[in-house]
Amino acid sequence: MKIMIDAGHGYETPGKRTVDGMREYEFNRAVANEIKKLLHRYSGVTTLFSHSDKQDVPLYERTKKANQANVDLFVSIHANAHGNGKEWTSASGIETYVHSSKPKTAFALAKIVQAELIKETKRKDRGVKTASFHVLKETKMTAILCECGFMTNKVEAQLLKEQAYRHACATGIVNAIVTFYKLVEGKGAQHTDTQKLYKVQVGAFSEKENAEKLVNELKGKGYQAFISN
């Protein structure tokens, strides 16, 4: 089974960020990476990415890549927003989308994905919805899009930054895929995406507060940053 994981937007996408500055792509790619790791346990599964850490990938290129690779499933990861994006609002929760034509297989999968996301995150259930988003309309395979929380909700914006919450979202999505497609754990998982990740140390401090200040600055610029003792 081939699964394409799509981390929505990119580091340079304008406007897609929390009120306090975290770019949406930082969350999306983190969940995409977690999904890939979790799917590694299952036999006969090939995972690919539609996005890139080097540049924003246009929507038409993402769907073209999925169609040319003849994947079986396309999963797009996003974080939601409400209002003008410049101030906190009360809108909250998780929702899963399928195309407005309501494809039978996609809709059935989306219902399980939505249920598992709510189970893992304990956030408000906004249900399965339909839309004519490009990645749902132009893909030839089963396709879903997950909105995993609101960047404009102060509580959820903080959650979107936390590794535990990102892992919970990935776990919910993978659990649903495993259940729906009856995947079996074991050897034989395949990963054709050759993207590599590198870590760089950017500072060493004797005072933790100085390290935290630098981490916050880097996160505000869209980088993944953490403190290691």
Image (spheres, rainbow, N blue to C red):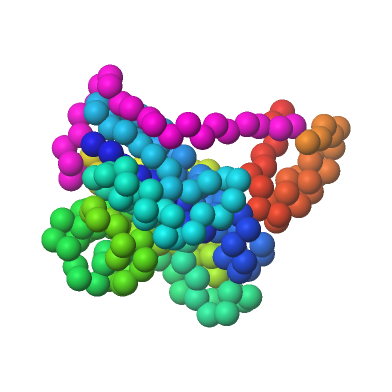
Residue 90 image offset from top left, x and y in percent:
50, 75
Give above or below for 185 relative to 65.
above
Give above or below for 39 relative to 88.
above
Q: Magenta segment, principal secondary structure?
A: loop
Residue with the most extreme top position: 187
Residue located at (23% from left, 36% from top):
1
| Front residue of this view, candidates 78 and 10 | 10
Residue 161 image offset from top left, x and y in percent:
57, 52
Q: Is 81 a magenta residue?
A: no
Number of numbered discs: 0
On the question of residue 32 being in view, the answer is yes
On the question of residue 162 being in view, the answer is no
Residue 179 image offset from top left, x and y in percent:
19, 42
Residue with the most extreme bottom position: 83
| Front residue of this view, candidates 17 and 10 | 10
Residue located at (66% from left, 64% from top):
20
Horizontal side of 219 relative to 108 (left or right) equals right
Residue 9 image offset from top left, x and y in percent:
51, 58
Q: Quadrant of residue 85?
A: bottom right
Q: Quadrant of residue 110?
A: bottom left
Residue with the most extreme left position: 104
Magenta segment boundaries in residue numbering: 179-201
Residue with the most extreme right position: 206
Residue located at (42% from left, 60% from top):
60
Give above or below for 15 relative to 66.
below
Q: Can you say which quadrant of the picture contains the C terminus?
A: top right
Residue located at (26% from left, 67% from top):
99
